[in-house]
Image (spheres, helix red, strand yellow):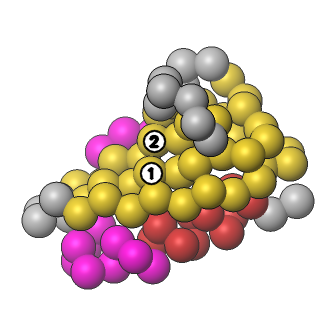
């Protein structure tokens, strides 16, 4: 299982399942297993509690795309 993590600023906020919209300095963590199953989690930088992004059963056709998908998500979540 591969894990990637990035810190970014969300000025317009990011929707989570558990607490609704969060904004500010956030950390996105994505994990991808050998079968391409992708999980997405987000937290405030320095916080212990992680939140789930909406949606279920994310799967990559090719697990080698994990890096590209992670960077794309950060870019989309960070844009104003």
Residue placed under numbered mark 2 in the picture: 41
Say if the magenta span includes residue 7: no
- Name the residue located 80 percent from the left edge and 63 percent from the top edge: 79
- The kind of secondary structure element at disc 2 is strand
Q: Which residue is mark 1?
A: 29
Magenta segment boundaries in residue numbering = 54-68
The residue carrying pointer 2 sits among few (fewer than 14), some (14 to 19) or many (20 or more) residues within 10 Å by Cα, namely some
Query: In the rendered image of this protein, does residue 63 appear above or below residue 32?
Result: below
Q: Position of residue 60 (x, y in %)?
A: 29, 67
Q: Residue at 23% across / 73% down in the picture?
A: 63
Q: Are the two marked residues, 2 and 1, in contact with CB atoms closer than 8 angstroms? A: yes
Write down the quadrant of residue 62 in the picture: bottom left
Q: Residues within 10 Å of mark 1 (few under 14, many from 20)?
A: some
Q: Residue furthest left?
A: 34
Q: Is residue 64 left or right of residue 1?
A: right
Tell me what residue is drawn at x 69 percent, y 57 percent: 8
The answer to whether residue 3 shows anywhere in this view is: yes
Given residues 57 and 6, the one toward you in this image is: 6
Say which of 55 and 14 sits in front: 14
């Amino acid at each position: 299982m591969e894990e990637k993590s990035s810190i970014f600023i969300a000025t317009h906020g990011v929707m989570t399942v558990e607490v609704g919209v969060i904004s500010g300095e956030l950390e996105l963590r994505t994990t991808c297993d050998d079968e391409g199953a992708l999980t997405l989690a987000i937290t405030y930088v320095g916080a212990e509690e992680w939140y789930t992004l909406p949606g279920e059963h994310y799967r990559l056709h090719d697990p080698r795309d994990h890096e590209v998908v992670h960077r794309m998500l950060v870019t989309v979540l960070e844009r104003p």
